[in-house]
Amino acid sequence: MIDTHCHIDLYENPIQIANECEKAGIITIGMTNLPSHFEMGYQHLLSYSKVRLALGMHPLRADVHNKEFPGFVRNLSRTSYIGEIGLDFSNDGISTKEIQLDTFIRILRELNGKNKLLSLHSRKAEKEILNYLISFNIKSAIFHWYSGPLALINDIVKAGYYFSVNTAMIKSKFGQNIISKIPLANILTESDGPFIDVNGVPAKPTNITLIHEYLSKKNNLSIKEIDILITNNFRRIISHLK
């Protein structure tokens, strides 16, 4: 199994989660919300073969973006994974729109020409993010927990980008509609733990099985076929990192 978006550092016991992933063989990309968080966690995960830490700058932490940005540049060479980054123009983030845009553009300038995989927060800013990715020639990106217009999905796919789906999406009608519009060749999986609950407790990478089961039933494929499909999708998106 593969978890392309998990906030390992925000669980009560991050090392326990990392150990579970390692033991179960779950490839897990741990998001961070700020470069300072990446620096705190980086050394703790170096010995793991299945768990990697991403360098992030969450749009809802725009209040400290200017202070944190030098740390983003400083740590960029330490990982192939970038996230969580992006834009949030919902009611939660619209007041810092200009700061977010400035930071996002600065990040994409730093990433231009580099082989990195991005995990993107795009709430109410999906079109803007797509346009910026294309204009900065970003090769590999995942729209995490996409909730934007259904009509835009095809444009994102045409640009060569992917979507990561989670257990919250498979439970909601809107989420199911989004998943139905995404080609199987562009689907990846995520837990987004601990921000999603499964049966009243924070979701973990091991809950990815629920997504495999959903995709299996929806597409009349076996669990093994879904596992192979997601694995191949992930291998394809990271192939440029090698």
Image (spheres, rainbow, N blue to C red):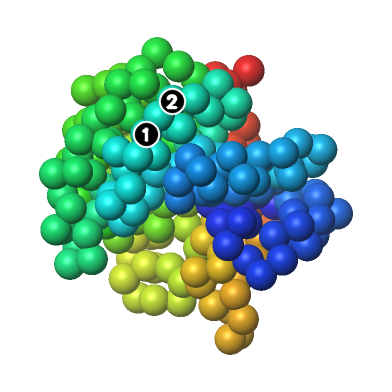
Occupied quadrant, residue 142: top left
Percent position of residue 78, x then y = 60, 26
Q: Is residue 239 above or below residue 170?
A: above
The answer to whether 220 appears left or right of 27 in the picture is left
Q: Is residue 111 above or below residue 207?
A: above
The answer to whether 154 appears left or right of 163 in the picture is left
Q: Is residue 84 above or below residue 242?
A: below
Query: Mark 1 packing: few (<14 Cα in 10 Å), some, or many (20+)?
Result: some
State if disc 1 and disc 2 touch (CB < 8 Å).
Answer: yes
Residue 31 showing in the rendered view: yes
Q: Residue at x 66, y 39 (%)?
A: 42
Percent position of residue 201, x then y = 61, 81
Numbered-mark total: 2
Q: Which residue is mark 2?
A: 73
Q: What amino acid type is highlighted by mark number 1? A: Phe
Residue lying furthest bottom? 200
Query: Mark 2 packing: few (<14 Cα in 10 Å), some, or many (20+)?
Result: some
Residue 227 vs residue 26, the one in the foreground = 26
Residue 161 vs residue 24, the one in the foreground = 24
Percent position of residue 145, x then y = 40, 58
Q: Residue at x 51, y 72 (%)?
A: 196
Q: Which residue is mark 1?
A: 69
Occupied quadrant, residue 9: bottom right
Residue lying furthest top? 113
Residue 16 vs residue 50, the one in the foreground = 16
Percent position of residue 149, x then y = 20, 56
Rounded to the nearest angstrom, the CA distance separating label 2 from label 1 is 7 Å
Residue 231 showing in the rendered view: no
Q: What amino acid type is highlighted by mark number 2? A: Val
Residue lying furthest right? 23
Q: Residue at x 40, y 13 (%)?
A: 113
Indicate the quadrant containing the C terminus: top left, top right, bottom left or bottom right: top right
